[in-house]
Image (cartoon, rainbow, N blue to C red):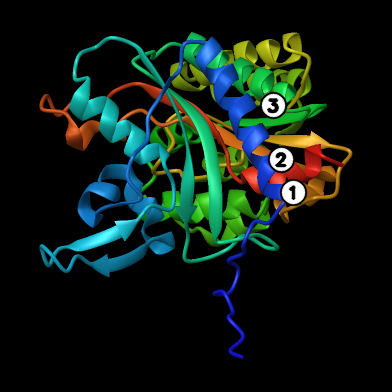
């Protein structure tokens, strides 16, 4: 008898795990709906250029590609649903009205996170048309509320803001090459790596070295950042936004830390970025090991993702989050 083997890092979901996942999915969607978020269901495959348009190109290395036998065009299997929801918002609802959408669906990725699967069930919520910090506050509070609805607590949200780095890069007039090199040094938390970037001025090198150490409790980091970073309107605005978001997180019953050198998806995100960890659990990813906790959700602001779909050619304010792996979430909350 032939033994059927699934592709690497792809698994069946069997009873009773499948039933627990469905209950978790339903509880999350019900929480979103109670807050006015409407359900959408984008297709599993799209034309590749539409799937990866704009800043969605960051996902290209994680996208399975295939030829459509009907049209002969190149298609992609979605590795993430957020860009699809941005397309829906831009093409079907092209006015300036604030809109709220949620989703739950499978995604497939060419690469798996350490210890993870390539076939995931992603559940999330997206808010469009709200450019102020109140949109970010709404999103983090909804994430905390929905996580609590499925017993994912206590939570720690580790937040950053790519606007701080982008403002500093503009302030010091960095070239695109220097910007990429500094980004890599910050990702490694390596002040010494900055010494190898010869185009940096002494002042710029000192400021970015300071940035590598700006992580920890929110109040402490904000105080140190205001005292040590250049007086710049955009930097100040970003720090003010982090102050408001961190206060909302604490008011919602979660913990908050900041990391101003954490810049995931620098070409994709435009403001707040955050990762939510479920504390006092075994880590499910290498990133979570720093906190001895499992990654529950990821999110942030990504203004402009729908720009290519809009007739006006203008960007659209957008912020949101996703529970990146429903199975992993269900397993850690069932322990």
- Are discs 3 and 2 less than 8 Å apart at CB? no
Q: Residue furthest bottom?
A: 1
1 or 3: mark nearer the eye: 1
> In the rendered structure, which disc, 1 or 3, sits on the residue that comes first in sequence?
1
Quadrant placement of the N terminus: bottom right
| Rendered image quadrant of residue 73 | bottom left
Relative placement, left or right, of 10 versus 79 is: right
Residue 147 - label: 3
Q: Give how far across and how far down residue 268 sits, in percent.
A: 40, 41
Q: Label 3: how many residues lie within 10 Å, few (<14), some (14-19) or many (20+)?
A: many
Task: Let me know if residue 93 appears in the view.
Answer: yes
| Rendered image quadrant of residue 116 | bottom right
Cα distance between the residues tagged 3 and 2: 15 Å
Residue at 40% x, 63% y is 61
Q: Give how far across and how far down residue 310 sits, in percent.
A: 16, 29
Residue at 65% x, 55% y is 188
Q: Secondary structure at mark 1?
A: loop
Q: Give how far across and how far down residue 148 sits, in percent.
A: 74, 22
Cα distance between the residues tagged 2 and 1: 6 Å
Task: Let me know if residue 164 appears in the view.
Answer: no
């Amino acid at each position: 008898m032939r033994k059927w083997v699934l592709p690497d890092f792809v698994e069946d979901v069997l009873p009773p795990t499948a039933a627990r996942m469905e209950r978790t999915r339903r509880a999350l969607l019900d929480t979103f709906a109670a807050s006015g978020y409407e359900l959408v269901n984008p297709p599993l495959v799209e034309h590749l250029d539409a799937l990866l348009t704009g800043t969605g190109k960051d996902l290209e290395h994680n996208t399975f590609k295939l030829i459509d036998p009907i049209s002969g065009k190149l298609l992609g299997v979605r590795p993430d649903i957020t860009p699809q929801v941005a397309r829906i918002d831009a093409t079907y609802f092209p006015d300036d009205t604030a809109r709220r959408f949620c989703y739950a669906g499978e995604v497939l990725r060419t690469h798996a996170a350490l210890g993870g699967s390539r076939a995931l069930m992603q559940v999330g919520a997206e808010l469009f048309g709200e450019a102020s910090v109140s949109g970010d506050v709404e999103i983090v509070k909804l994430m905390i509320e929905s996580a609590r609805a499925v017993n994912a607590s206590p939570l720690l949200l580790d937040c950053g803001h790519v606007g701080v780095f982008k403002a500093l890069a503009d302030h010091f007039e960095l070239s695109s090459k220097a910007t990429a090199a500094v980004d890599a040094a910050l990702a490694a938390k390596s002040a010494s790596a900055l010494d190898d970037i010869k185009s940096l001025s002494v002042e710029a090198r000192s400021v970015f070295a300071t940035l590598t150490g700006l992580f920890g409790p929110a109040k402490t980091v904000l105080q140190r950042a205001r005292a040590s970073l250049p007086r710049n309107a955009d930097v100040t605005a970003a720090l003010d936004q982090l102050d408001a978001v961190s206060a909302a997180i604490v008011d919602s019953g979660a913990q908050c830390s900041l990391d101003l050198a954490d810049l995931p998806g620098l070409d994709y995100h435009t403001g707040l970025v955050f990762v939510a960890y479920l504390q006092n659990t075994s880590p499910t990813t290498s990133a979570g090991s720093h906190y001895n906790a499992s990654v529950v959700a990821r999110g942030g602001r990504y203004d402009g993702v729908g720009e290519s779909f809009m007739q006006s050619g203008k960007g659209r304010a957008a912020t949101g989050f996703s529970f990146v792996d429903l199975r992993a979430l269900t397993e850690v909350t069932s322990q």
